[in-house]
Amino acid sequence: MKQLQTLNDVTRLAHELQLADKAFINGGFVPARLGKTMATRNPATGEVIGNIAACDASDVNAAVSAARAAFEAGSWSKRSPGERKAVLLKLAALMEQELEPLAVLESFDSGKPVSECLAVDVPETIHVLKWHAEAIDKLYDHTAPTGNALALVVREPIGVVGCVLPWNFPLLMLAWKIGPALAAGCSVVVKPAEQTSLTSLRVAELALEAGVPAGVLNIVTGTGKEVGEPIGLHPDIDMVSFTGSTATGRRFLHYAAESNLKKVVLECGGKNPALVFNDADDIAAVAGHVLNGAFWNMGENCSATSRLLVQEEVKEALLAEMAKQIGGWTMGNPLDPNNRLGTMISPDHFSKVSSYLDTARQEGLRVLHGGNTEQGAYVQPTIIDGVTPESALFREEIFGPVLCVTTFKTEAEAIALANDTPYGLAASVYTGALNRAIRVSRAIRAGTVTVNCFGEGDATTPFGGYKQSGFGGRDKSVFALDQYTELKTIWIDVSENDA
């Protein structure tokens, strides 16, 4: 394995990569049926790094037909759990062999720091696939207590699944969806984000090599209008799993209602609080966690703790410690292993995030750190003080490296501020008191609450949100399998026949 220690090492590998330029349908790469293509760009430079198939509803139909045929034939759905496990473990092994090329491809395509892709994104993607592979033959079905009958309660794969992915964690979100879906025996049609399709296409190619049959895993590239909407409306897709904005998530509920009432699982936006109380034990450690929660992945993270709610007595000490540490959040070329912050995904998203910096100035808020942009792609890690609940910065998901600071006096006020949002995805609580940690964690309306750290749990824990942050199910853990399977009752009369 190569050692990617310098910008030259990474850049050289980036330009050696063989980039897919077609959709992956029924076990092979195919152009869009209408012959259209769309550019995929390096977010750091705007350079076109490839042109890939711009598919539409006709391509979705072809992928769904292939997925349905594979499902009904049973080439995957009727294999034993152990056989599916072996194939998925081989896929994980093939990805391990390509860890560095996958990491560089992810960074090149998305603007994510290559150091994060190498250390977190690709290893965690592989781990998630392994975890679901290992879990599937360890889940038992049930019998129900009855009288003169044997009642079996069994799981069956739901059928053809549509997976619609975001651009902020292309590989990891792919694994969160296809890991449990393939483990359960489903066939899958994936729409990657149009900005970040390249790693999904490579994984599909490796999956075929690992033994996933043709038609079981399909990647249809294109825009939300041309590919995402047809997936949502397709009458032969049994379930859709979507990660992205709340506004787009609402559309998939409409699509389901307008078509075949397919099941829909949504993981949507967040406006997540980090609550720091005056009895927090280690202010230096808290500062590190808060900065990580706000700026990791450039803040392009639905679980980013972008609202710092800090008790008055400890505010100045915490902000002073954050000022010491923020210099470690170096920003620049995502392919440079020394940088922790890369670019915004696109010019449009850059403009959106930048507009909130303008809002802060218009509202007369104090910018403690950052507040500037560079080269039409980079947003400095920014801390803004004095943000009130009435401000757009408090209420709206910025999805960039912007941390908003609000003070509170009492625990009750902190909880009220934390819950003063239509979202409920994640939160963090920092306190040295065990009873307060438990009490506040239970009071916050969010799907994941971390105590004295920032994170999302791991592959063993479910991830999803309350309120407008989620709908219909959870990603990760054994609970994810619930959404890719149907429960069936088999009732067998075993009463004695006296005739």
Image (cartoon, helix red, strand yellow):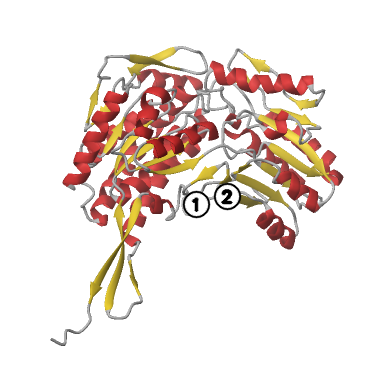
**Residue 100 occupies quadrant:** top left
Name the residue located 43 percent from the left edge and 33 percent from the top edge.
165
Circle 2 residue: 447
Within 10 Å of the Cα at label 2, are there few (<14), some (14-19), or many (20+) other Cα atoms? some
Q: Tell me the amino acid under the disc marked 1.
A: Pro
Residue 58: x and y in percent read 27, 24
Q: Which amino acid does label 2 sit on?
A: Gly
Residue 159 is left or right of residue 446, and the answer is: left
Asked whether, in this view, residue 197 is left or right of residue 244, the answer is left
Relative vertical location of residue 418 with respect to residue 246 in this rendering, above or below = below
Looking at the image, which is closer to me, 76 or 115? 76
Q: Do the residues labelled 1 and 2 touch (CB within 8 Å)?
A: yes
194 or 339: nearer the viewer: 194
Can the viewer see residue 486?
yes
Q: Where is residue 28 in the image (x, y as percent from the top left)?
A: 22, 29
Provide the secondary structure element on which disc 1 rests. Answer: loop
> Residue under circle 1?
462
The quarter of the picture where the N terminus appears is: top left
Counting from the top left corner in percent of width and height, residue 139 is at 35, 61
422, 244: nearer the viewer: 422
Label 2: which secondary element: loop
- Which residue is pictured at 72% across the width and 23% down the height? 370
Q: Residue 185: x and y, percent?
A: 28, 49
